[in-house]
Image (cartoon, coloured by chain):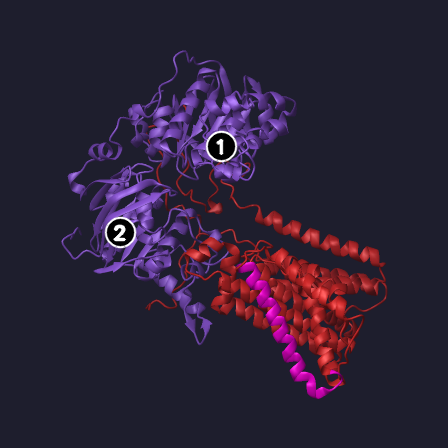
């Protein structure tokens, strides 16, 4: 299996890449042998995705060489790379929901017979590829929108296979999968490797890396830390190499003087179409983390609290009084704030100014407080350390971190008593992250109750006083502060055994 | 490639199949026909008489041509508002060039099609290369053509020879030749969408341009070709009108309201205005629904105001029905009243219900995976 002495199929050497003068990859290289499963690990922002995108030709590299099958290659487009035998399964799906599986697999390369698209061949070959992977639950003729996330992931892989790929890169292929679906993916990866396909496997889940990979390459801050056989590493050592710094330096402790107060938000057995039977108590001054896989119902939970998809069952109390929130407007009036997951689509009016964005909620819900909020705005922005050319600058020209701070400013203006944060640090730089963490601690000290959804387990562990884990639309576990990643992941994938008793 | 060619379909879990849009249109059409025939019978007339069928089919053909082309454009997530002016221009070019002489027919038809192709190509290039929204781009080219028509023609012009007028006048039984040609074009259009790469790519470009590009599709091509074909079907509509009127007319297109009516027919036929989903046959169904509704109202001598009201209601109601279906994107995980994960929904939750409760009380046996929960398939 780990016949790494064989002639390498892919050699990357000294790849470098900068964005806007920030170097995100410094001289990273690796070698892939046929049939090898090669794990690429590192924290968010370590440069894994950039590295993959350089190989795939999504970005052009600044320096370094890539050799595929002995020939130097210079891809400028992922399709070019795919034709040469280097296929990539990106984290976000590249599928057309309204088209069938076969049409998606052969998109852009439809087989022709007598000048017309040969639909029978398309279906037959898609079927054959699915059979090779041992998948018999996917109909080649079914529209992709009728498939589950896991099945769509498989379609992506089949799409990669259909180009006769010698190298397949997978970016977090299990991010959206449930437990048994991960097993299926394992089987597929092993089958591909057995056929001599080299696989570059990027994942945050270290268990997967150890389960699947022959070789592990560790990146940190855009540089290569180590490459070596998986058998020579263990989880602790790997984490040490990835992180390289204690987590505590990153996450501020609670501010002195923070006290746990009365319950602000209480949910008792709430449910709607997307979540079911969630109990939750959120107290003043408390930060509760919500972990769980994508699609586990985390976002749906806070959307329920915020009245976007109102709860239809169970009871919700705010400051001890029952309340039935049926619209976002009502939620805002009641002192709830929701920092949404998708900043650009749901958090900001991108081509409006910082001031307009920061005053958006106040103007529309508490119009009478606008003047006061406008007066306080410069202070709020500077306390959040927003870097801009002034409050009139359009937010689309700000960096991700500064945009997020504007979103926070918008909600701080409403003086909320309950703050719901959905992936508050996604896609922002480390400095901005730390600013967000400090802000959360400050709010907690002022008696605000905070519920934070995050996919980054270190963040959940580092910031939370308690951790709720969502799985399959339910709160599958409530864990104490500083629970370890393995326990959280187990709860998130529905495989947690609580025999040891994780009593709060 | 495979030795298991006719392998029996593997056991699949039941999926919640959504009704195919063109099927819904078909059902709606049948419903409209039934209601219509009852209404017509109530005033003592026969809806299914040969004469009435011919009227309905005649009413379909002009809008049918325009709507077929419009379907392609809308599939690509663009729009064509220039069609009424292309229709008028085509009728004029045809009638002027024919000038009553049957020998000029081939040249006139060819010229009309070439001019339309040029206009369509221009539309497509403006949309794809200058990145002007299709709505605005074709509004612009439409106005340019309108300006030309307004300044150069004060009324009808030219003369269409009898031989060409036959196309609009004759029929096979109750079916007019023009309708047969329109249906022939519809067959070609449907074949084009289903069986050519460019046709396939129209769905991709309209559905998600980013995905199309990452799949190596040259995204401009399908859009340009859609606009080109749309102008050409509009030209066919213009030729048919010239044949019926015997002359060319600078206002025949805009009087027909073919821009908005064709868009309405396309949307009525289940094609997504945002692109990426739809079909020619749905559009033909939409056109037929309009024709039947119009016909019933004419037979019953409904006043013109009420006619427009009914048309308006049909369009709005149709889109409301479709939107209700489309916005339900996220599948419910729990349906009211059944607090267990909904197996029939078939989403990614096939693990058994969790036996943990969130108070953190220890449960000896944790949720067991149950991948075999392939609900009775």
2 and 1 marks on the same chain: yes
- Which chain is in purple here? A
Percent coordinates x, y for residue B151 in the rendering: 76, 67
Range covered by the magenta-colored residues: B99-128
- Is B312 situated above or below A117? above
Q: Please identify, in this view, whether the residue under mark 2 or under mark 1 is nearer the observer.
A: 1
The quarter of the displayed image where residue A431 is located: top left
**Residue that protrudes farthest toward the left in the picture:** A5
Q: Mark 2 points at which residue?
A: A199
Query: Looking at the image, which residue is at 29% across and 43% down?
Result: A25
Q: Which chain carries label 2?
A: A
Q: Colour of chain B?
A: red
Q: In this view, does B71 lie to the left or right of B349?
A: right
The quarter of the displayed image where residue A123 is located: bottom left
- Is B101 in the magenta? yes
Q: In this view, does A206 lie to the left or right of A432?
A: left
Foreground residue among A422 and A118: A422
As drawn, the label of residue A389 is 1
Percent coordinates x, y for residue A333 in the rendering: 60, 24
**Residue that protrudes farthest toward the front in the picture:** A389
């Amino acid at each position: 299996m780990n016949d790494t002495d064989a002639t390498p199929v892919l050699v990357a050497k000294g790849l470098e890449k900068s964005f806007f003068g920030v170097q995100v990859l410094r001289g990273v290289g690796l070698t892939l042998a046929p049939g090898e499963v090669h794990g690429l690990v590192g924290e968010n922002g370590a440069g894994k995705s950039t590295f993959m995108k350089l190989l795939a030709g999504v970005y052009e590299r600044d320096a370094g060489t890539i050799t595929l099958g002995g020939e130097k290659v210079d891809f400028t487009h992922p399709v070019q790379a795919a034709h040469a035998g280097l296929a990539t399964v990106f984290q976000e799906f590249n599928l057309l929901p309204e088209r069938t599986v076969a049409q998606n697999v052969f998109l852009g390369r439809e087989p022709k017979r007598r000048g017309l698209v040969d639909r029978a061949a398309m279906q037959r070959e898609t079927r054959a590829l699915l059979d090779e992977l041992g998948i018999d639950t996917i109909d080649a003729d079914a529209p992709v929108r009728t498939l589950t996330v896991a099945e769509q992931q498989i379609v992506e892989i089949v799409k990669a296979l259909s180009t006769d790929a010698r190298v397949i890169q997978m970016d977090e292929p299990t991010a959206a999968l449930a437990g048994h679906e991960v097993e299926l993916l394992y089987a597929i990866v092993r089958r591909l490797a057995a056929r001599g396909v080299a696989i570059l496997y990027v994942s945050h889940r270290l268990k997967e890396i150890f389960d699947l990979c022959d070789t592990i390459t560790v990146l940190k801050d855009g540089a290569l830390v180590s490459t070596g056989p998986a058998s020579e590493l263990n989880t602790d050592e790997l984490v040490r190499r990835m992180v390289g710094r204690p987590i505590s330096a990153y996450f501020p402790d609670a501010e002195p003087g923070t006290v746990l107060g009365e319950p602000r938000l209480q949910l008792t057995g709430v449910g709607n179409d997307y979540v079911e039977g969630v109990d939750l108590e959120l107290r003043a001054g408390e930060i509760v983390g919500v972990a769980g896989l994508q699609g586990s119902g985390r976002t749906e939970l806070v959307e329920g609290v915020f009245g976007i998809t109102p709860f239809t069952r169970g009871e919700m109390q705010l400051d001890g009084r029952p309340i039935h929130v049926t619209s976002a407007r009502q939620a805002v009036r009641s002192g709830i704030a929701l920092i949404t997951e998708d900043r650009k689509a749901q958090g900001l009016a991108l081509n409006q100014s910082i001031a307009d964005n920061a005053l958006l909620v106040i103007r529309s819900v508490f119009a009478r407080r606008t003047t006061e909020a406008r007066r306080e705005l410069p202070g709020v922005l500077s306390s959040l350390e927003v870097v801009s050319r002034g409050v009139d600058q359009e937010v689309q020209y700000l960096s991700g971190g500064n945009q997020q701070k504007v979103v926070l400013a918008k909600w701080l203006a409403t003086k909320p008593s309950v703050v719901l944060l959905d992936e508050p640090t996604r896609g922002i730089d480390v400095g901005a992250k730390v600013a967000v963490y400090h802000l959360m601690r400050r709010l907690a000290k002022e008696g605000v109750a905070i519920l934070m959804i995050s996919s980054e387990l270190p963040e959940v562990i580092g910031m939370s006083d308690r951790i709720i884990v969502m799985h399959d639309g339910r709160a599958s576990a409530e864990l104490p502060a500083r629970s370890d990643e393995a326990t959280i992941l187990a709860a998130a994938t529905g495989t947690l055994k609580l025999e040891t008793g994780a009593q709060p | 490639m495979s030795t298991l060619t006719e392998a029996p379909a593997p056991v699949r879990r039941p999926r919640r199949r959504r009704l195919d849009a063109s099927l819904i249109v078909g059902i709606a059409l049948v419903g409209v026909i039934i209601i219509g025939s009852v209404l017509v019978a109530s005033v003592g007339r026969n809806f299914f008489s040969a004469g009435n069928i011919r009227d309905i089919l005649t009413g379909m053909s002009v809008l049918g041509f325009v709507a077929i082309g419009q379907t392609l454009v809308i599939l690509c997530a663009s729009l064509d508002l220039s069609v009424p002016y292309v229709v008028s221009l085509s009728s004029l070019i045809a009638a002027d060039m024919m000038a009553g002489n049957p020998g000029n027919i081939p040249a006139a038809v060819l010229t009309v099609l070439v001019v339309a192709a040029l206009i369509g190509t221009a539309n497509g290039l403006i949309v794809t290369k200058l990145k002007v929204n299709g709505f605005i781009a074709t509004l612009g080219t439409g106005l340019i053509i309108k300006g030309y028509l307004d300044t150069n023609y004060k009324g009808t012009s030219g003369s269409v020879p009898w031989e060409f007028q036959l196309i609009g006048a004759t029929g096979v039984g109750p079916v007019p030749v023009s309708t047969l040609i329109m249906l022939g074009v519809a067959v070609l259009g449907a074949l084009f969408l289903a069986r050519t790469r460019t046709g396939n790519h129209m769905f991709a470009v309209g559905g998600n341009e980013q995905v199309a590009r990452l799949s190596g599709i040259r995204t401009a091509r399908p859009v340009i070709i859609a606009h080109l074909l749309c102008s050409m079907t509009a030209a066919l509509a213009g030729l048919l009108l010239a044949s019926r009127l015997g002359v060319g007319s600078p206002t025949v297109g805009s009087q027909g309201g073919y821009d908005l009516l064709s868009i309405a027919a396309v949307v009525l036929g289940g094609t997504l205005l945002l692109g990426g989903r739809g079909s020619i046959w749905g559009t033909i169904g939409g056109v037929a629904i309009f024709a039947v509704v119009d016909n019933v109202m004419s037979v019953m001598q409904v006043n013109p105001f009420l006619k427009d009201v009914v048309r308006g209601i049909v369009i709005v109601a149709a889109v409301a029905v479709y939107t209700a279906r489309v916005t339900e994107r996220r599948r419910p995980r729990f349906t009211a009243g059944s607090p267990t994960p909904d197996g029939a929904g078939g989403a990614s939750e096939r693990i058994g219900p969790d036996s943990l409760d969130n108070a953190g009380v220890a449960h000896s046996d944790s949720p067991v995976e149950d991948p075999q929960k392939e609900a009775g398939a």
